[in-house]
Structure formats: structure tokens, C-alpha cells
Amino acid sequence: MKSRAAINDVAISPSMRREAPLFTRGRTGLTVIGVALTTFAILYGIVRKNRSAAADAAITLRMQKQDHPVFDRLMRIVSWAGFPPQSRILPPAIALAIALLGYPLEAIFQFLGWGTGGISFLVKRSMRRARPSANETRIRVVAANIGGSSFPSGHVLNYLGVYGFLAYLVHTWVRPVGLRRVLRGALIAMIGLVGPSRVYLGHHWFTDVLASYLLGTSYLIALITVYRKAKLFLLRVRGR
């Protein structure tokens, strides 16, 4: 029978060695989740009582003054993946591609990243907030296939769940440092820019986007934490 040290040595893969410091930060992750969810609850109450309307409108109008054609094009491109039908095709397609590469556990968790869509649906039903309207304000609303409640932003939530977990996999899988940085940076930039793009295009209020970043970050941290534990368990079992 192998010693515990030998089993642990087998269990820790090169990618997980690079992540070693993160394995010791369980309490930090829980703290971040706690702060994020508490802030979300406060924000939810503020929006529910309609106390953020003036600030939301002012922020949108200020963002829409950035009318440079390159910026405008970037905002539209960043939001593209979050609209149907691509928003319903890309998440399962990414998970399927990972499974076909021979990584079933990673494929399962990549698919679970899409679970943020369920969170979005439930919160939207409870809030039922109206989206920005060009008829009532000076806000410009770009025509798009959208509907339902404005709070929270489904785009932001899904990007954090789907592309956030994919960025984590890229960070742990891709070995060439240059390629890893490019791919990871592109995914993180995509996640970071999608929030501003939703406000700029007039599809969401700032508080919708902020709430989604808080919820999505909490979900992503929890998902990665469970994945790490599942991965470590399987590797240890195989190493016995």
C-alpha cells in the first residue's frame, strides 16, 4: 500500500501545483462570497424600493456620451455571445468540446457554469424591474432580442459562470505561458467589459450589472471550490 505522502504526490498534478496557494484559501473564498451576497442583499433592497433610479439614469447617460465608433463597436461585440441563439448554443458546445477532449469532470463543471442562467431567471421573477426605456428618458436603447425583467443582468451572470470557469480551466491547463496569458486575459476582459456594455447599449441599469457581478462571482467561487475538491478526490482515488 502506498504511503499517504506518495498518494498526495500522485494526486497533485502539475496544474494543481501551480494552483497550490489557492487550495489553502477556503476561508478567504467563503469571506468573499459572504461579503458579495450581503452586498447583493442590500442592493436588492435599494432597487426594490426604487431608490437607485436617479443614479442609474445618470450613470447610463454619462456612459452613452462615449460615442467613439471603436468603443461603440467593442461594446456591441462584447455583448454578442449573450444574445440568443448563441447564448443557448455556446455554453453546452464548450462543455461538449471539453468532454470530447477527454475531460468528463471538467466538462460537467463547465456545463454547471451555465447554472447562473437559473439564478438569473429566479431573481428576475422576484424583482420584475422595467428595463431602460427610450420613450421615458434620453437614454438610447439599441434594438436587440431582449425581454423580461432588467434586474439582474443575465449577460453578466452567464459570462461569469461560463467564461469565468473556462478562464480558470485555461489558467490550470494551458502550459505555454504566453498562450495562457492571452487566452485568460481575453476571457477576463470579456467578463469585465460585458457589464459596461449592457449599460452602454441601454439594456440594463448599473445596479442590474453590479448585482450580477456580485451573484456571479459568488457562484463562480463556489463552483471552482467544489470542482477542486472533486478533482483532488478523484486523483487521490486513482493514485491508490
Image (cartoon, rainbow, N blue to C red):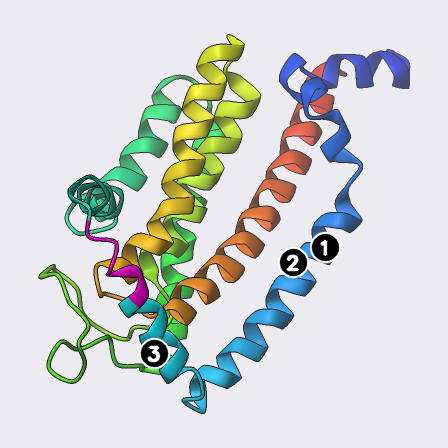
Q: Quadrant of residue 208?
A: bottom left
The circle drawn on residue 30 is 1
Does residue 218 appear to the left or right of 199 in the view shown?
right
The reply to whether residue 163 is in sight is yes
Amino acid type indicated by mark 2 = Ile
Nearer to us in this view, 99 or 165: 165
Residue at x-position 48% and y-position 11%: 178
Residue carrying label 3: 125
Within 10 Å of disc 3 (Cα), the crowding (few <14, some 14-19, many 20+) is few
Dominant secondary-structure state across the stretch colored magenta: loop
Amino acid type indicated by mark 3 = Arg
Q: Are marks 2 and 1 in contact (CB under 8 Å)?
A: yes
- The quarter of the picture where the C terminus appears is top right
Of all residues shown, which one is farthest toward the bottom? 49
133 falls in the magenta region:
no
Where does the magenta region start and end?
62-67
Does residue 27 appear to the left or right of 221 in the view shown?
right
Task: Say which of marks 2 and 3 sits in front.
Answer: 2
Nearer to us in this view, 219 or 197: 197
Give percent across and percent down for residue 76.
19, 47
Amino acid type indicated by mark 1 = Leu
Mark 2 element type: helix
Within 10 Å of disc 1 (Cα), the crowding (few <14, some 14-19, many 20+) is some
Q: Is residue 160 above or below residue 56?
A: above
Sooner in the amino-acid sequence: mark 2 or mark 3: 2
Sooner in the amino-acid sequence: mark 3 or mark 1: 1
Residue at x-position 24% and y-position 44%: 71
Residue carrying label 2: 33
Mark 3 element type: helix
Give percent across and percent down for residue 60.
30, 68
Circle count: 3
